[in-house]
Image (cartoon, helix red, strand yellow):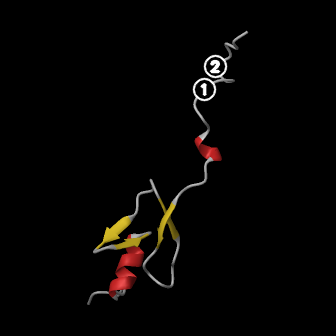
Amino acid sequence: MYPFDRFEIGLPDRQADYPTQVADCAYVRCANPIYAGEPNWYYYGEWFCSSLCIAKYLGADKRCAN
């Protein structure tokens, strides 16, 4: 007989799938993996995991304004 339990038959569990790694962060000192479906930064053909990594990659530093 066909089971009518909605939890026994349903959508596949997305947590059981391994995420697809697209690239690594372009900032060499970071190099965190970047996975498909996550919000990340794309700048001139390079992937970055955060805006801080983009700033460091471009050579920006944080200073106090006088």
Q: Quadrant of residue 60?
A: bottom left
Pointer 2 local density, CA inside 10 Å: few below 14, some 14–19, many at least 20: few
Q: Is residue 6 above or below residue 47?
A: above
Pointer 1 local density, CA inside 10 Å: few below 14, some 14–19, many at least 20: few
The Cα atoms of the two marked residues, 2 and 1, are separated by: 6 Å
Q: Is residue 61 above or below residue 37?
A: below
Q: Is residue 13 above or below residue 25?
A: above
* Number of numbered discs: 2
Q: Are marks 2 and 1 in contact (CB under 8 Å)?
A: yes
For the point 64% across and 24% down, which residue is it?
9
Q: Quadrant of residue 19?
A: bottom right
Q: Which residue is mark 1?
A: 10
Q: Is residue 49 above or below residue 29?
A: above
Q: Amino acid at mark 1?
A: Gly
Quadrant (top left/top right/bottom left/bottom right) for the N terminus: top right
Helix, strand or loop status at disc 1: loop
